[in-house]
Image (spheres, rainbow, N blue to C red):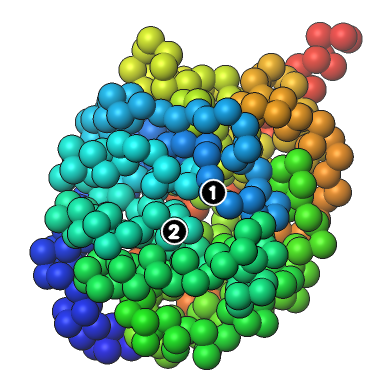
Amino acid sequence: MLLPMAKRLLTETDQRLLWKLAWNFGFRGMQAIVKHKRRLRRGEFFPPFLYLSVINSCNLRCQGCWVDVAHPQEKIELDALSDVIRQANAMGNYFFGIVGGEPFMHGQLLDLFEAHPKCYFQVFTNGHFITLEVARRLRAAGNVTPLISVEGTETVSDTRRGRQGVLNRTLEGIQHAVDQRLITGVCTSVCQSNIDDLVSEAWVDRLIELGVLYMWYHTYRPMGPDACPELALTPDQQRRVRQFVVRTRATRPIGVVDAYYDADGQALCPAATGFTHHISPQGDLEPCPIVQFATETIYDPRPLAETFNRSEFLRDFRQLAASHTRGCIVLERPDLLQELVVLHEARDTTQRDTALAELAAMTPRPSQADPEHEIPEQSWVYRLAKKHFFNDFGAYQNPIDPLAARRGKSQVGER
């Protein structure tokens, strides 16, 4: 599939945008990983990629959403966003995932992209705000790939997204992006209501016909005040999605992203490995978007590099997660995350102030870790890329459980 995919990239995109992808994301991304590995060898830490939730507001009301989309608007202002990006650039990082809420509801988002031409931005969006004018500005900037979420057929989308007519507006956004020859992706949070429709060859082929160049299957995470746990996938279904992703990578001319497995099919957690962390709309430094607790913010007076490097909460989260599972500790052991939050007196970074109670009420469930059914990559391209640039970075080699260590000290003190 390498040659057909290369042909699509060369014929279906603006060549200037393709160059920006290769240089800003590809070359600089590889450099960011190399520098990350060097920092780890020195005992230092700064994530090679950052996810920025620029705003909490959204025009949809999705099932299982953990973002306070209906609460008063919180957003990171342009100056603060630019400061974060400049400080990350100083550490060798040039790729940023832009999330929300709905990022395009941030009035200065396009200004941000245009102000940082050496960076590359992936925007997680429902596509409703990608008008022809917005798509033209994205093409002019050249350093943005929209990743547009589709959650099912027309009826399923309306139910999943809490509004009417969602799918048609999303498809319009995709069409505007493709018409402007943007490097356009489509993502899906795979759950019980959409797995049969969207984890299928027919859907992949339709995306290729539309001009979509890559896709991303997320696994539905039942979190937040209305978690909808009935939508969560079973272990068999998670294996089905993994097998489909691996097969599609080897048989279809479309890129397929996943964030949960290495080249050998072993599960991993990007937050546990230190590959990425998340910044909330309030500027809080969180392990990942679904872990809404923090002890530091981007507004702390010390440099961002020092804040990340010295954060005991983030360090202990990485060690705790790696010491208990290669999957998602939030799903498998919410009790341990609750204990960690209490230990560090981490702030609830939501506006609803119920995140800790939600953790306490969670029912543990399986995540992507499935040692007896690991499915390695079939494509040599993906195997090579993952071996060097997306792996566990040694996080799962003899990790220390910070909670057990603290309990041990307490017991010694009591004796």
Q: Nearer the viewer, residue 105 or 97?
A: 105
Question: Amino acid under label 1?
Answer: Asn
Q: Nearer the viewer, residue 17 or 407?
A: 17
Can residue 352 be seen at all in this image of the molecule?
yes
Q: Please determine whether, in this image, residue 118 is positioned above or below residue 267.
A: above
Question: Amino acid under label 2?
Answer: His
Residue sitting at x 47%, y 21%: 297
- In which quadrant of the rendered image does the N terminus lie? bottom left
**Where does label 1 land, which residue?**
59
Can residue 333 be seen at all in this image of the molecule?
no
Q: For residue 381, which quarter of the picture?
A: bottom left
**Label 2 vs label 1: CA separation?**
9 Å
Q: Please determine whether, in this image, residue 365 is positioned above or below residue 53.
A: below
Is the residue under label 1 in contact with that under label 2 (CB below 8 Å)?
yes
Residue 116, percent across and down? 19, 40
Q: For residue 103, which quarter of the picture?
A: top left
> Which mark, by number, is residue 128?
2
Residue 125, percent across and down? 45, 55
Residue sitting at x 67%, y 62%: 160
For residue 11, side relative to residue 292 (left or right): left
Residue sitting at x 47%, y 66%: 169
Residue 118, percent across and down? 16, 45
Residue sitting at x 35%, y 54%: 122
N-terminal of the two: label 2 or label 1? 1
How many neighbours does mark 2 have within 10 angstroms: few (below 14), some (14-19), or many (20 or more)?
A: many
For residue 267, side relative to residue 104 (left or right): right
Q: For residue 330, which quarter of the picture?
A: top right
- In which quadrant of the rendered image does the C terminus lie? top right
Q: Please determine whether, in this image, residue 370 is positioned above or below residue 282.
A: below
